[in-house]
Image (tube, coloured by chain):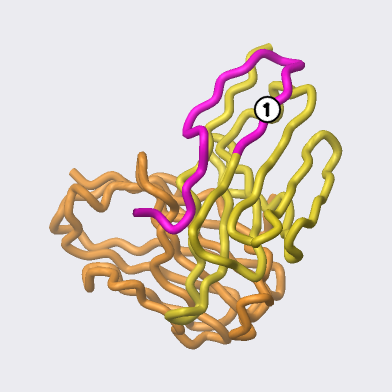
Amino acid sequence: TQLLEQSPQFLSIQEGENLTVYCNSSSVFSSLQWYRQEPGEGPVLLVTVVTGGEVKKLKRLTFQFGDARKDSSLHITAAQPGDTGLYLCAVLALNTGNQFYFGTGTSLTVIP
Amino acid sequence: ETGVTQTPRHLVMGMTNKKSLKCEQHLGHNAMYWYKQSAKKPLELMFVYNFKEQTENNSVPSRFSPECPNSSHLFLHLHTLQPEDSALYLCASSPPLSGRDYDIQPQHFGDGTRLSIL
């Protein structure tokens, strides 16, 4: 089993639609990050959330950290083709050292 | 331009070859990482260096050998690889690790080396 499960795994939508992707775990984390990876490039950090229930907005992207700090969601309003990419959540778990764990990823395609 | 440069971008090698991947960061960071990204699998952390000292080795086979001569450069030496080692290898850097799980640092990634083992 994966530490971080993301859903859906794949998502294809039309430009202008709204969507939400999820990152879930049975473990509690002090903080969580979201990255976006475009084809042929490395992941780029979008946001870090650190407080249970925290909501952060980045233009049309809204990130929420669950109250229990076990899960997070990313909502995109009026998706655009430029939003196409692989969305990854990541946490730092120190149970065995400096262990960064990434989620399974959601591959988003926005069709013009 | 992310500030983290990886070379080469693509590498094809036979199982008996020896090659090295290079990563250089111009961000003044003191932590550097190697990740493996395979199809249908999550990004896997391989090695972590903090102030040039290796802090993590996630049970990576000895055919992968990292080297961090200074805080700006990171190498991954490869020898006698297997076909299942074909993947995208990503380097990242960040401010130094504090050892506190609430002190998660932003990682800056390079664009990776696409490795194919014949």
Q: Dot 1 lies on which element?
A: strand
How busy is the neighbourhood of tag 1: few (under 14 within 10 Å), some, or many (20 plus)?
some
Q: Position of residue A73 (x, y in %)?
A: 66, 44
**Position of residue B4 in the picture relative to residue B76 (left or right):** right
Examine the structure image and report whether residue B30 is included in the region drawn in magenta: no
Disc 1: which chain?
A: A
Q: Position of residue A51 (x, y in %)?
A: 76, 65
Q: Residue at x 65, y 61 (%)?
A: A68
Extreme residue in the front direction? A68
Q: How many labels sit on residues?
A: 1
Residue B4 in view, yes or no: no
Q: Residue at x 60, y 53 (%)?
A: A71
Q: Position of residue B41 (x, y in %)?
A: 37, 46
Image vertical order of residue A73 relative to residue B34, above or below:
above
Of residue B79 and residue B29, the one placed in the foreground of this image is B29
Examine the structure image and report whether residue A13 is included in the region drawn in magenta: yes
Corner quadrant of residue A70: bottom right
Q: Colour of chain B?
A: orange
Q: Residue at x 53, y 32 (%)?
A: A107
**Position of residue B14 in the picture relative to residue A63 (left or right):** left
The residue indicated by pointer 1 is: A19
| Residue numbers of the magenta segment | A1-21
Of residue A65 and residue B42, the one placed in the foreground of this image is A65
Residue B82 in view, yes or no: yes
Of residue A97 and residue A70, the one placed in the foreground of this image is A70
Q: Position of residue A36 (x, y in %)?
A: 63, 43
Q: Amino acid at mark 1?
A: Leu
Q: Residue at x 54, y 35 (%)?
A: A39
Q: Colour of chain A?
A: yellow
Corner quadrant of residue B79: bottom left
